[in-house]
Image (cartoon, helix red, strand yellow):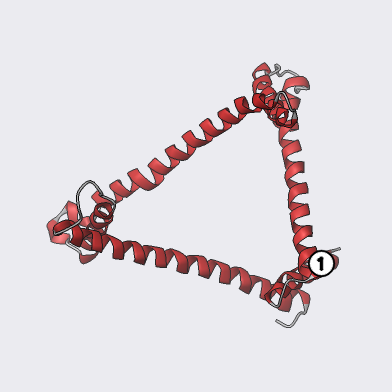
Amino acid sequence: METVGIWIGALCTLAIFSFLLRENPFFRTAEHLFIGLAAGLGIFYGYQTIVSNAWTPLFNPDPGEARKWFLIVPLVLGVLLYTRFLKKGKWISRIPLGFLVGVGSALAIRGVIGASFMSQIVATMELPLWHTMAKFKIDAILFILGVIGTLIYFFFSREQKGPLKVGASIGKWVMMLAFGAAFGNTVMARMSLLVGRIYFLLGEWLHIL
């Protein structure tokens, strides 16, 4: 069975790589197979989540456990999402959709403020430059200049000339370096995936390595 799985994985990998030449039936078959499997797996896990987290605790709880009636609320909201397929009642689907968007936005904003905004301020204030001048480091002052310059770049209340123009130029170069480093990390991550696939083909499939 393991051998069959290796052969299927190898053939699908080669079919995906064939797109480098041109679009062909092998690539489309592998693409549709991947999308179909992903959709089926998503439906399966969604069904398991509903049964284990909502249906069973509500209608078939374990012995000694009370029924969790509050789970009726998310179940009803989930069912209301399907009213979108009704001609006259599709407006009802906006109610659970509003809950989803509101809760999702709140969680996203909280995560962004904590991870990107507050952590950046804390990391800047905890640099060695602020603890003692005896431990002055060039990277600390460069870090501070980069942060201030980037903030000045997005300061549009006044015309960027004089010191503001210099700070904005520093911020622009800092962002270019940051975007370049992020792009390089993305390329390296994709290259590691490519190396993994090549190692799979030459090692586990062809046993050359």
Provide residue 177's location: percent of width, then percent of height. 35, 66
The quadrant the C terminus occupies is bottom right
Is 153 displayed left or right of 106 in the figure?
Answer: left
> Considering only vertical position in the picture, is 197 above or below 48?
below
* Residue 38 x %, y %: 73, 52
Q: Which residue is mark 1?
A: 8
Of residues 13 and 65, the one nearer the viewer is 13
> Which of the 4 image quarters holds residue 190?
bottom right
Seen in the picture, residue 91 relative to 12 is either above or below; the reply is above
On the question of residue 203 being in view, the answer is no
Q: Describe residue 78's horizontal placement relative to residue 113 as left or right.
A: right
**Residue at 29% over, 51% down:** 154
Nearest the viewer among 202 and 87 is 87
SS label for mark 1: helix
Please state the horizontal and vertical placement of residue 35, each as a whole percent of the image: 74, 55
Residue 192 visible to the viewer: yes
Q: For the point 35% across and 65% down, which residue is it?
A: 176
- Look at 49% across and 36% down and name the residue there: 105
Q: Position of residue 197 (x, y in %)?
A: 67, 71
Q: Is residue 89 above or below residue 12?
A: above
Q: Residue furthest bottom?
A: 208
